[in-house]
Image (spheres, grey):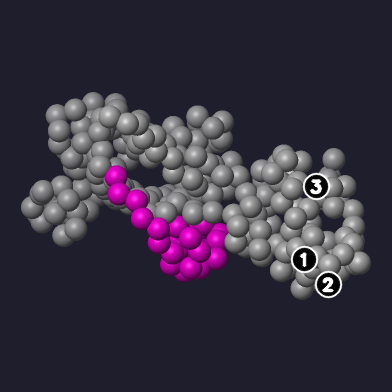
Amino acid sequence: MEQGSQFFSRIPSLDDASPTPLYMQLQDLIRTAIESGAFPPRLTLPAERDISEQLGISRVTVRKAISGLVEDGLLVRQQGSGTFVMSRIDKQFGKLSSFSEDMAAKGRMVTSKWLGRTKANISTEEALAFGLSLGSQVYRFRRVRYADAEPMAIEVTTIAETALPSETAVGASIYDALAQQGQRPVRAMQRLRAVLFEPAQAQLLGVEPGGPALYIERRGYNSKGLMIEFTKSWYRGDAYDFVSEISCM
């Protein structure tokens, strides 16, 4: 079934005589369809113009309804692609796993866009994190991570020079490359906070500048207790839920 037909089969018309504003009626119908599973994740909504013409309402009304659902995290707008039903991902914050492993567990295809893969002099921030001198060198990897062709996160990973033979040793997964050297992190310290996407970051992910982001800073340690990974990640706040299990002692 075409996606436009699927949309209008669930939202055939609105009630002009109802005291409920038209934009709220449309919101409620779309919300119900999403929550019931009738509108599955990644379903593309028809263009605002098409919804306006089909339902006989103004484009302002359509835009107001959709904007409210975007703010609620049920829909997402992507520049040049349209408006989609959000596909949210639960990330276990207490589990040490890579992006590739997380997406594979969800049955999603992982790809990356490399922004940089270099060997460089350590920065002051990195030297303080690793406890190394400013004369040291590190491997630095910058990339955009995708799930099912949808941009999900920006990662900047710094790896200690002793953990890899070269920057080209990393293919699809940094953790796989580290495992081959016996250097995969076995524990990590992670810090999470809510931030807003800067314009350059938003452009890479196809979201609005100033949109919600989840920033995670991770310091990974190998089996000998040596820190070998320093990763900064910016996840889309409209696509991720971080989950942590808590038990009583």
Seen from the viewer's position, the closer of residues 132 and 38 is 38
Q: Is residue 191 left or right of residue 209?
A: left
C-alpha span from label 1 to label 2: 10 Å
Query: What numbered label is drawn on residue 58?
Result: 2
Q: Secondary structure at mark 3?
A: helix
**Classed neighbour count for the residue bearing mark 2: other residues with Cα under 10 Å, few (<14), some (14–19), many (≥20):** some
First-in-chain label (2 vs 3)? 3
Q: Quadrant of residue 169?
A: top left
Residue 139 lies in the magenta-colored region: no
The picture places residue 136, in percent across and down from the top left corner, at 12, 50
The picture places residue 91, in percent across and down from the top left corner, at 45, 39
Residue drawn at point x = 82 percent, y = 50 percent: 7
- Three-letter code for the amino acid on which mark 3 is drawn: Gln
Residue tagged 3? 3
**Considering the image in quadrants, where does the C terminus appear?**
top left
Q: Secondary structure at mark 1?
A: helix
- Three-letter code for the amino acid on which mark 2 is drawn: Ser
Residue interval drawn in magenta: 190-213
Q: Is residue 243 left or right of residue 61?
A: left
